[in-house]
Image (cartoon, rainbow, N blue to C red):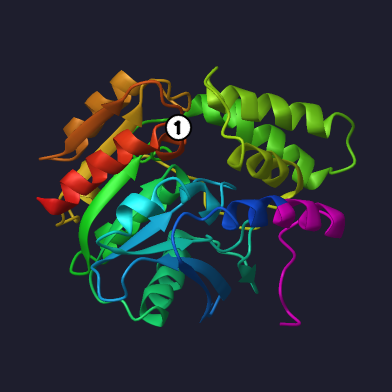
Amino acid sequence: MSNTIPVFTTPEGETETMQAYQAIVDHWPVSFTELMVPTSFGRTHVIASGPESGPPIVLLHALLATAAAWYPNVDALSQTYRVYAVDVIGEGNKSRPTKPIKVLDDFLVWFTELIEGLGIDTFSLVGNSYGGFTGAYYAMKLPERVRKLVLIGPAATIYRMTPFYFHMFIPKAIYVMLPKLPGLRRTMRQSVDWMHAGLPFDPLWEPLFYRSMVFGSLINQVLPRVYTKEEFAQIKSPVLLILGDKEVIYRPQPALQAAKELIPGLQVEMIPEAHHITALAQPELVNQRILRFLAK
């Protein structure tokens, strides 16, 4: 599409990032189909796995994490469910935006067009970080369609996340505006290290995430915020909150307590030895918790 907006700072950076992405796709643990779904904000890339007749699950990744971050989870989830791992439009991934998302309702339009393009009626929704923030909004505005909602370390949403802005967002935003500023790779490496909280790196995903941090653009204009109790009351589905005990965007225990006050009936799981991308850090534990929640 001639009016596609670039989501990488350089063509060389895009090539390098997509090579790291493909390395994960080459290790996708189950058979899959890659889809490009047209929306009014551009074409959205989706990796679909599992039986086509299975109940649908939509997976929304963290900022710049890409749909490939779910590769340790799709095997367990797709045994029963039809799993759609979405490349959120407007970030450095395989989706191809034609205009930026400026407000939350733009996200809602995009997401509604996406699920309708996939032929999905009702579904369960799993969102990590930024994907949790937007996923909660979709559950508020589409209560008749979201059957169950899983929030994994949601960005803001339940609790302020000042450390994230200091360690990741502000450094990244500076280099998006000034990509030739010295020290880019060193600063992005420090951001990636901070997020991992001293825990081991995933050998496939970490090279991709680092390159997404270095070369990915940020064209969308919606910053996460904490929702009100009245907003959460719009959600009619059961909600599961999963936090890693090494979460760094906010302190896990205060965030968990705040979430319980905001969301009546909330179910919670604290995952040991897990960082912000909790489903990647401890996939077996997270898969078990999600499947148990969905089966209830």
State whether residue 92 appears in this view: no
Magenta stretch bounds: 1-19
Which residue corresponds to mark 1?
281
From the top left corner, tell me how far across and down residue 75 is, in percent.
38, 53
Residue 291 or residue 146, whichever sits in front: 291
* 6 is within the stretch colored magenta: yes
User: Tag 1: residue type?
Assistant: Ala
* 49 is within the stretch colored magenta: no
Residue in the picture at 54% in, 53% down = 68
From the top left corner, tell me how far across and down residue 213 is, in percent.
69, 41
From the top left corner, tell me how far across and down residue 39 is, in percent.
51, 79
Residue 55 or residue 107, whichever sits in front: 55
State whether residue 222 appears in this view: yes
From the top left corner, tell me how far across and down residue 82 is, in percent.
32, 67
Q: Is residue 86 left or right of residue 135?
A: right
Give the quadrant of the N terminus.
Answer: bottom right
Above-or-below relation of 204 to 261 = below
Q: For numbered disc 1, what is the local secondary structure?
A: helix
Query: Which quadrant of the structure image shows residue 279?
Result: top left
Residue in the picture at 63% in, 30% down = 192
Residue in the picture at 66% in, 45% down = 208
